């Protein structure tokens, strides 16, 4: 079933906030992925659903030759602006991760950080990554572990789901959040020697209001909801979520240990 988060307009709406608010945290997961996939200087790397280029720019620092692909016009524009502003050689390509515009065996390593998991057809995305990798090339894909161990996220998204039962993540889990889901999907696409790692990084929010404000700017699930709510209803939701966090978790600040899965597999 297609995820509502597979629409470009949802990601267009959060492109600026995503780059400003999430890159400092997400760069840590990107570094983990680069290390686990064994990226070396001179590798040709593909970053699928690259967003603002968190992994792409880090891979360049590691000495890789990088191509970044995304389906969101706003994300692509932001990538190009950053590449030009920082004089960093990232080739930016608009496109669909389920139908990659590249030749077979064109890359040494491929990645999708919290992107492929939202494709309408993730299996197609995995098969395409397999196709464009050279033999013995590696793919790394990340997802979020279930939120039951992250009280701030669980409380926030649970409060949203109380108003909107169809809210993505309302049950506290992202697609492919369990290791066996990633393992099975990779193997079905033809990858071998698949390993699924759990990595955790810490971030903080000074208050419930600041946490909500950050998510308003950068969270695609919340952007999706906002598109369908009148301004008064959105204000009511904000007030209720902030109040629920303060009631259940106190006034802050809040520390958040956020676990993610990173699956790595090899094309035979």
Image (spheres, rainbow, N blue to C red):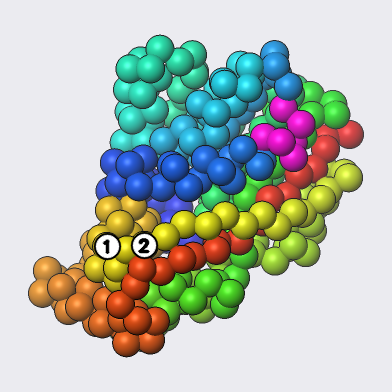
In the picture as drawn, the residue positioned furthest to the left comes out as 232
Quarter of the figure that contains the C terminus: top right
Tally of marks: 2
The secondary structure that most of the magenta stretch takes on is helix
Q: Is residue 36 magenta?
A: yes
Quarter of the figure that contains the N terminus: bottom right
The quadrant in which residue 81 appears is top left
- For image coordinates 70% across by 13% down, the residue present is 42
User: Closer to the camera, 262 or 6?
Assistant: 262
Residue range highlighted in magenta: 34-39
- Vertical placement of residue 161 versus 261, above or below: below
| Position of residue 214 in the picture relative to residue 181 (left or right) | left
Verify CB contact (< 8 Å) between mark 2 and mark 1. Answer: yes
- For image coordinates 34% across by 72% down, the residue present is 252
Which mark is drawn over residue 205? 2
User: Closer to the camera, 253 or 60?
Assistant: 253
Q: Position of residue 117 (x, y in %)?
A: 58, 54
Q: Position of residue 128 (x, y in %)?
A: 67, 37
- Vertical placement of residue 133 versus 71, above or below: above
Q: Visible in this render: residue 57?
A: yes
- Vertical placement of residue 263 versus 60, above or below: below
Kindly identify which residue carries mark 1: 210
Q: Position of residue 147 (x, y in %)?
A: 55, 72
| Position of residue 202 in the picture relative to residue 86 (left or right) | right
């Amino acid at each position: 079933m297609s995820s509502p988060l597979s629409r470009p307009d949802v990601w267009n709406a959060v492109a600026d906030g995503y780059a400003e608010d999430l890159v400092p945290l997400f760069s840590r997961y990107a570094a983990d992925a680069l290390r686990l996939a064994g990226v070396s200087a001179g590798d040709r790397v593909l970053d699928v659903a690259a967003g603002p280029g968190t992994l792409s720019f880090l891979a360049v620092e590691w000495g890789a030759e990088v191509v970044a692909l995304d389906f969101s016009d706003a994300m692509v524009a932001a990538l190009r602006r950053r590449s030009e502003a920082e004089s960093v050689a990232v080739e930016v390509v608009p496109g669909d991760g389920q139908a990659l515009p590249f030749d077979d065996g064109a890359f040494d390593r491929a990645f999708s950080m919290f992107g492929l998991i939202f494709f309408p057809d993730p299996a197609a995305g995995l098969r395409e990554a397999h196709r464009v990798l050279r033999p013995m090339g590696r793919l790394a894909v990340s997802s979020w572990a279930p939120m039951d161990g992250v009280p701030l996220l669980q409380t926030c998204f649970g409060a949203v789901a109380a108003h909107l039962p169809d809210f993505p993540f309302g049950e506290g889990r992202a697609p492919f959040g369990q290791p066996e889901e990633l393992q099975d999907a990779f193997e079905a696409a033809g990858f071998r020697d698949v390993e699924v790692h759990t990595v955790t990084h810490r971030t903080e929010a000074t208050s419930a209001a600041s946490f909500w404000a950050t998510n308003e700017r950068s969270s695609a699930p919340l952007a999706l909801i906002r598109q369908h709510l009148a301004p008064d209803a959105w204000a009511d939701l904000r007030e209720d979520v902030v109040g629920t966090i303060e009631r259940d978790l106190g006034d802050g600040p809040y520390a958040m240990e956020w676990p993610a899965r990173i699956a790595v597999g090899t094309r035979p």
